[in-house]
Image (cartoon, grey):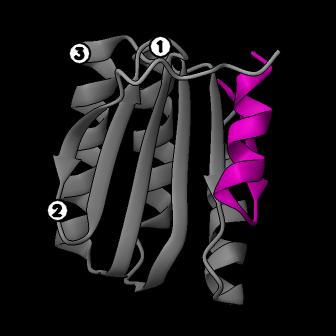
Amino acid sequence: MLCVSDGNTKILIKKDYLEVKWEPECRIMTAVWSGWLNSRRGFEGCNLLLELVKEYGVPKLLNSNSKVTGHSGASDWLGDVWLPALSDAGVRYMTWVYPREFFTQLQIDNVIQRCKQMEIRTFFADEEARIWLEQY
């Protein structure tokens, strides 16, 4: 059954590199990352997202890198610290939309393989990722 938004979507963060929306009726938080993500932006954005997940009690997260042009790393931190923290905060289902850059896709796969606390699926399009999340 698809969740139909009733128009109460809230934009929680709007930065040049990250936009986060919350749909309370669907219980889906969407994070859309953009441009080049250096370490500062990556850590800042991930920590902001974690705080919002805690605040809103988010069970489903759509993490989109479809607009990312590159990043400077921190794969170990993402897999060993950030993903387990998201799970501890209540995320049960997560989708991760790949960027176009192939080697970044491989890094995402490496990060996800470390996480056993929640169910994570990768996609090439935000729409496909959302459809998968809506089944839960």
Q: Residues within 10 Å of mark 1 (few under 14, many from 20)?
A: some
Disc 2 marks a residue whose amino acid type is Lys
**Residue 65 drawn at (x, y percent):** 52, 66
Res. 97 image quadrant: bottom right
SS of the residue at dot 3?
A: helix
Q: Nearer the viewer, mark 3 or mark 2?
A: 2
Question: Marks 1 and 3: CB-CB under 8 Å?
Answer: no
Q: Is residue 70 above or below residue 73?
A: below
Relative image position of residue 113 (x, y in whole percent) = 74, 50
- Local secondary structure at mark 1: loop
- Label 2 – label 1 distance at C-alpha: 25 Å
Q: Is residue 87 magenta?
A: no
Q: Secondary structure at mark 2?
A: loop
Q: Which residue is mark 2?
A: 15
Q: Earlier in the sequence, mark 1 or mark 3?
A: 3
Task: Indicate which label's residue lies in the foreground, 2 or 1.
Answer: 2
Q: Amino acid at mark 1?
A: Gly
**Can you identify the residue that label 1 sits on?**
90
The part of the image, by quadrant, that contains residue 118 is top right
- Residue 55 numbered tag: 3
Determine whether 17 is above or below 134 in the image. Answer: below
Q: Is residue 121 left or right of residue 126?
A: right
